[in-house]
């Protein structure tokens, strides 16, 4: 094994609504560490306003992607796994990477195993930490298991390409490179494969809220909020803090909010800097999705609620009294 990592890395630069997702820059940061002195490439796939792709490509080039391969094709206008996996495949054929890094998002989770199978590579999903070892010659990937109760540390055997997905909000974003050393941007030829599925239309909810998976601050409500209207104080607190609103499955099942807000084993996995759990008991399935948050504040009127077991700060009290008071205090800052 070589003394330093000297590998070619490829990043799948995922976009949402024409903009780079933050996890794409976290993946780029990981790829730069993993490549060591090797080359770092990024693939940007989409179709739409050329200006949006150009802006995203420029940001990647300014943050250390040596070459940004842009694939602009009508087949990539909407997410279709076969089309996007083929786009990554086209970039992989051009670059011959030994490492491919994607965000552990809904799209990344769909694409990474397809790419790994196509390239006969190994796959490590949901990585939360990367340790460069062996004097820079190897890397160990950490991923949570059993709803965050255990951690698995894995390394790849030499040979096959490494396909890695990184959990949003866990790894630092790639820092900008000095002016003058930005990467280049080039168009990559691409032939869309036959698609097994067609997206006819997307019915989205215009929530205007921050994306839960990438939010730095989350105010989450459980069955303790008692109604859809009960979420109003949580919304107000989230707004003052510039955060997003999430929920337990208990709150979703009760019809207080949309399932898109559900956090936990069968919902979203989040790792914000601050997680404020309001009226959430702390069932193991909920903890699975939020226990890795950096600071957890729990507000619950039951002092024995299990959520206090993972909380850094606990407030025993009625959320309808505590949350508005917190909002009031934060408004003054
Ligand atoms: P409860 O357990 O009913 O807790 C409500 C809490 O609110 C209580 O602790 C109570 O003391 C407190 N409270 C009430 N009123 C107030 C007040 N005024 N002020 C302050 N506190 C108050 N759950 C998830 O969250 N996410 C998942 O992804 C998920 N996946 C699951 C998958 C499976 C296979 C199964 C079996 C379950 C799953 N669940 C999941 C459900 C989970 O087991 C719990 O039922 C659920 O998390 C409970 O939600 P809750 O904490 O909001 O409700």
Image: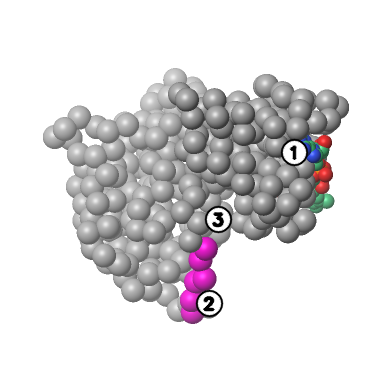
Mark 3 CB near ligand 1 (8 Å cut): no
Q: Relative to 266, say whether 174 is above or below.
A: above
Q: Earlier in the sequence, mark 3 or mark 2?
A: 3
Q: Kindly tell me whether residue 44 is visible in this rendering.
A: yes
- Tell me which colouring the rendered structure shows: one colour
Horizontally, residue 138 falls left or right of residue 275, namely left
Q: Camera-side residue: 119 or 142?
A: 142
Q: Earlier in the sequence, mark 2 or mark 1?
A: 2
Asked if the stretch drawn in magenta spans residue 203, the answer is yes
Residue bearing the label numbered 2? 197
Give me the residue at 33% from left, 49% from top: 42
Q: Camera-side residue: 330 or 282?
A: 330
Q: Which residues are magenta?
A: 200-205
CA–CA distance between discs 2 and 1?
A: 41 Å
Classify mark 3: residues with Cα within 10 Å, few (<14), some (14-19) or many (20+): few
Quadrant of the rendering where the C terminus is positioned: top left
Classify mark 2: residues with Cα within 10 Å, few (<14), some (14-19) or many (20+): few
Q: Are marks 3 and 2 in contact (CB under 8 Å)?
A: no
Give me the residue at 24% from left, 39% from top: 62
Callout 2: helix, strand or loop?
loop
């Amino acid at each position: 094994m070589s003394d330093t990592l000297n590998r070619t890395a490829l990043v799948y630069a995922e976009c949402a609504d024409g903009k780079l997702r933050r996890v794409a820059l976290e993946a780029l940061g990981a790829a730069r560490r993993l490549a060591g002195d090797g080359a770092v490439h990024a693939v940007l796939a989409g179709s739409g306003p050329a200006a949006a792709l150009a802006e995203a490509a420029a940001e990647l080039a300014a943050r250390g992607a040596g070459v940004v391969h842009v694939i602009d094709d009508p087949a990539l206008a909407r997410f279709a796994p076969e089309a996007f996996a083929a786009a990554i495949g086209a970039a992989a054929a051009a670059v011959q990477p030994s490492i491919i890094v994607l965000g552990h998002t809904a799209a990344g989770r769909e694409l990474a195993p397809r790419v790994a199978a196509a390239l006969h590579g190994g796959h490590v999903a949901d990585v939360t930490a990367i340790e460069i070892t062996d004097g820079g010659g190897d890397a160990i990937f950490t991923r949570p298991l059993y709803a965050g109760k255990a951690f698995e540390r894995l390394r790849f055997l030499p040979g096959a390409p490494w396909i890695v997905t990184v959990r949003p909000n866990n790894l630092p974003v790639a820092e900008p490179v000095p002016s003058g050393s930005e990467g280049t941007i080039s168009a990559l030829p691409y032939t869309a494969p036959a698609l097994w599925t067609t997206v006819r239309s997307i019915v989205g909810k215009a929530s205007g809220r921050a994306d839960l998976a990438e939010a730095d601050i989350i105010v989450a409500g459980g069955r303790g909020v008692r109604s859809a209207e009960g979420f109003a104080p949580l919304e107000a607190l989230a707004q003052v803090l510039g955060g997003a609103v999430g929920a337990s499955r208990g709150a979703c099942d009760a019809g207080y909010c949309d399932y898109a807000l559900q956090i936990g084993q069968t919902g979203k996995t989040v790792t914000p800097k601050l997680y404020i759990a309001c009226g959430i008991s702390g069932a193991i399935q909920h903890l699975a999705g939020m226990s890795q948050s950096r600071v957890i504040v729990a507000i619950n009127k039951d002092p024995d609620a299990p959520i206090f077991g993972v909380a850094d700060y606990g407030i025993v009290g009625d959320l309808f009294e505590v949350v508005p008071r917190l909002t009031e205090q934060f408004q003054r800052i």
